[in-house]
Image: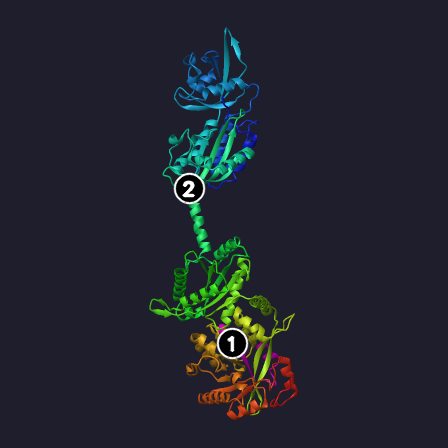
Amino acid sequence: MRNWRLRPSTAGAVIATVYLLLGSGLLFVTTRSATPDSVLAFTGGYLLVTAPLTAALGYVLATATGRRQRAASPTVHPDDAVVTFTADDWRIDDANEPAQRLLGYSGETLRGQPLRTLVEPGGSRWYDAFEDALTRGALSCCLAIRRETGEHTWVALGSDAPAVDGPSQRRHLVFRKTKAGFERRITRTVLQNVSDGVILLDHDWHLIWGNHNFERITQYPVSDVQGQLPPFAQAMRNNPALAAEITQALDHSGIWYGRVDSHRRNGERYPLIGNITRLSDAGGNTRYLCCFADVSRLDAYAEQIHQLASSDALTRLPNRDYFAGELEQRLGHMNADTDRCAVVMLNLNDFRRINESFSHALGDEVLAQVASRLRSNLPDGTLIARHTGDSFLVLLDAPTDATDAALVAEELKAMLASPFRVIDTRVTVTTSIGISLFPTCGATADELLRSAEAAVGDARRHGRNNYRFYTEALGHEARQFIEISSDLRQALNTGQLRNFYQPIVKADDFGVSALEALVRWRHPSRVMGPDEFLPVAEESGLMGAIAETVLDNACRDIKRWFCDELSEARIAINFSAQQFADPQLAERTLELLERHGVPPARLATEITESTLMQNHATAGATIAVLREAGMRIYIDDFGTGYSSLSYLRDLRVDGLKLDQSFVQGLPKRKADDAITRSIIAMARALSLVTIAEGVETAAQASHLRALGCDFMQGYYFHRPAPPSAIHAHYRRHDDRHQPRLSQ
């Protein structure tokens, strides 16, 4: 006789399992019929169970409802059904009226019938149930009895003390109608309809029962597997480590949860996630309740998510994060004394122009073709990744020395130099390449990537379309670059940038005609010259923000310092290439002037030749709007940029500024003299004024005046100074026509 009940520890473990499995849906199971001494103590309440555990907990509830802690003897109420039978042959001797109503039989029909008449034909638990009731006395178990009509009714069974009547011993069974049948029907329905597979195994892990989803998931009918090891149990027994893990967990807490591989009837392998709960009775007999879910789809989704997170959708290459992770993993298996590898970073020079000149769609196709060439020309298994928009990464596994890496860099440069054909367009790109070597340039993935990026920057600064190795000096420059860039961003937000001004004088009388605004940085802890921070600003994309700050400062200085003695002097502002790429530049500039109450005629703007050519599409419209509003437009550093002069014909500008490289050789250097004469003559023919910058001697000033230059600027006249110093000088000298301004 086996009376299955959960041990208290097992019950707790099953309850804990509610929170350990995923699922959806809710099940409410009432236990209002439970006695106060119920094993699981759910009396008078409701138990809320998540769907994946309904199988396990449903079975436990059914068992707990059917197995009560025994009292010495039930209290027999007048309405209780009592059946008397003889102990030697288990035949019914008598049944009271409540028993006849409950069982649906008349007393005459029952008399002389065996007790098994009351249970379902073929049932095997009735003897155990009756024996348990007779032995323990209390309403000790639940049983479905069969009425005369064929329907079933669930009753609780008990017994009072045995009575003796004549030579035969008579026993009494007490039947009390219970709700257990309804609860078990709920549990059975839930077990069959939960989305997980649920099975019950015997102590040898052979299948006793399984629900519909067990059949759906495994493709095995329950009838074909009953009495045998189910597929996952076979896999568990073939994996000693897993079997030991499960056994240890069951011995420790009565429950195991985790992942196991199994197979379907057609041989297909698939992963399961679930739990196994050990159920034991007082005699040490064991059953295993298993709840599991097929997570093969979840694994497929996880793989898709991993692919999306670790690859670049455009080029189908791994992304930077994947490259860094893979590199870090490989470095972990390398010996710094004997092993070598190299990180090669390729940057496509001026790729932004391709997007702007053609289209982003064409640019994307070029990037895809670059990736295809890298895959096709590098050895199979080479780790290639897309780093950023126009940068790629290659990992060289075993270069013998720097020479090997240099040869690969040359091959990559040549490979990408061939034109790319996109539809009917031929596109040519050049490549700047940076190389970092393990272990000299870094011992971690992050260090090697930073070193390669610093080397790329060095390659760009040295003419582009070449390669550079990382050096310690580059590391120092890179760290300094990051430090200056960070401080500069803070300076823009805290007002550390100030304007200095340098006068531009007339060539005939040296009278001040304009003031060029030059930015200076009042760094809180160090002296920071413009030659040090402006290149960093250019590369960091901060030139636009700095130029706007200079313009805002100039408007304030005009209102405060340059509204009396210098009221007719224009303030010249340098606009960056980043600003001219913005088609809203003119509109934003005029709005700022209006906000400060400064007329556009008080300002002039200086634009380099390279800026004009880089932003030819937007420059013409921007210049036209600003000039129409009253601003003067000058070409800065003339003669050092693009050789095409067609923009002088097409763009409406007011003058040219001769670069100081031509002025410095005057008056002795013949080549500089010839170039200067030519520029002044061309400007005069085009009705443009000329401004010579970098004038430092009286001889240069005199020679430029003789050549017909209109305006001059340089240390010979005045060094750049704060607006207060410029204002103070002209307050002392009512006549602005000073041959040379004091410093």
Figure quadrant of residue 646 = bottom left
C-alpha distance separating marks 1 and 2 = 64 Å
Residue 373's place in the image compared with 303, above or below, is below
Q: Which mark is residue 575?
A: 1
- Residue 286, given in percent of the width and then of the height, sits at 50, 28
Q: How many residues crowd mark 2 within 10 Å: few (<14), some (14–19), many (20+)?
A: some
628 or 289: nearer the viewer: 289
Magenta segment: does it hold 290? no
- Residue 169, given in percent of the width and then of the height, sits at 50, 10
Nearest to N terminus: mark 1 or mark 2? 2
Circle 1: element type: loop
Return the residue at label 2: 270
Residue sitting at 55 percent across and 76 percent down?
551
What residue span does the magenta drawing correspond to? 553-578
Figure quadrant of residue 686 = bottom left
Residue 404's place in the image compared with 592, above or below, is above
Magenta segment: does it hold 558? yes
